[in-house]
Image (cartoon, grey):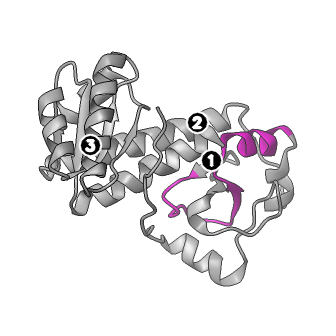
């Protein structure tokens, strides 16, 4: 299940990103297309000359930008476009696309944990179903290993809520139960709902970014 309906949120600009934006337009080094920063991933050369993703946009040094899509990062690696963009010879890990995925996933899971600490996450089928039906759920997470029957029932609840004039509630299936356990401090977490509130905005933003990276 994808995450159709996950909405855009404002992104925070780091100092490195802000300075760079003032000097250069943000264009993907693969497509050469100028894009908004929330559709790009910044990469920099580490002090030891290795290309690394700067997903928080706060690492020092000159950076370059790649469309936030795994396929585009893979192309940049294969064609060694980072060397041309950064005007030097750098080590470009063959695992860079996977490394970027891991960092984006870790950031989204961290945001899920922060939302829980803020009291904005409920877990378990009954609580998630209730949050969907009363319209307080903003984003529903189903574990990758969740049973299809449970997902179907919660999807039906979301449809009923929408048809009664409630909000359209997005759902996604990108984390395993074990990952959700660790993020939420629970055991055998299969379904979770992030409720409308401050910390949920960052969670939605990072989840959406991860999904777009994997699916593009």
Secondary element at image label 1 = strand
Which of 109 and 2 lies nearest the eye of the viewer? 2
User: Is the residue 209 above or below the residue 17 in the image?
Assistant: above
Residue at 66% across / 46% down in the picture? 69
- Above or below for 182 versus 108: above
Q: How far apart are marks 1 and 3 (CA)?
A: 45 Å
Q: Name the residue under label 2.
A: 99
SS type, badge 2 = helix
Q: Name the residue under label 1.
A: 52
Q: Label for residue 74?
A: none
**Quadrant (top left/top right/bottom left/bottom right) for the C terminus:** top right
Residue at the spot 33% in from the left edge and 30% down from the top edge: 142
Label 3 residue SS: helix
Stretch in magenta: 54-78
Q: Residue at x 58, y 36 (%)?
A: 99
Give the percent coordinates (x, y) of residue 36. Answer: 62, 69
Circles 1 and 3: CB atoms closer than 8 Å: no
The earlier-in-sequence mark between 1 and 3 is 1
Q: In this view, does 103 lie to the left or right of 27?
A: left
* Chain-order first, disc 1 or disc 2: 1
Query: Residue 17: horizontal and vertical position, in percent?
Result: 57, 71
Q: Which of the two labelled residues, at mark 2 and mark 3, occupies the earlier sequence position?
A: 2
The residue at which mark 3 appears reads as: 160
Query: Does the magenta portion include 71?
Result: yes
Compared across the picture, whether 129 is left or right of 62 comes to left
- Asked if disc 1 and disc 2 are in contact, CB closer than 8 Å, the reply is yes
- Answer left or right for 21 relative to 106: right
Task: Give the total number of marks visible in the rendering.
Answer: 3
């Amino acid at each position: 299940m994808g995450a159709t309906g996950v909405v855009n949120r404002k992104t925070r600009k780091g100092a490195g990103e802000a300075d760079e934006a003032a000097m250069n337009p943000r264009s993907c080094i693969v497509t050469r297309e100028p894009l908004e920063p929330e559709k790009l991933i910044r990469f920099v050369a580490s002090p030891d000359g290795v290309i690394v993703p700067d997903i928080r946009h706060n690492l020092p040094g000159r950076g370059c930008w790649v469309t936030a899509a795994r396929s585009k990062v893979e192309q940049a690696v294969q064609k060694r476009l980072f060397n041309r963009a950064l005007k030097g010879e750098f080590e470009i890990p063959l695992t860079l696309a996977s490394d970027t995925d891991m960092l984006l996933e870790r950031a989204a899971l961290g945001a899920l944990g922060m939302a829980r600490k803020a009291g904005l996450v409920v877990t378990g089928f009954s609580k998630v179903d209730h949050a969907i039906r009363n319209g307080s759920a903003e984003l529903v997470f189903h574990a990758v290993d969740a049973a299809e029957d449970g997902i179907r029932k919660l999807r039906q609840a979301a449809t009923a809520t929408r048809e009664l004039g409630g909000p359209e509630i997005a759902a996604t299936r990108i984390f395993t139960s074990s990952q959700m356990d660790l993020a939420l401090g629970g055991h055998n977490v299969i379904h979770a709902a992030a409720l409308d509130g401050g910390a949920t905005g960052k969670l939605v933003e990072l989840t959406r970014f991860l999904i777009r990276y994997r699916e593009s």
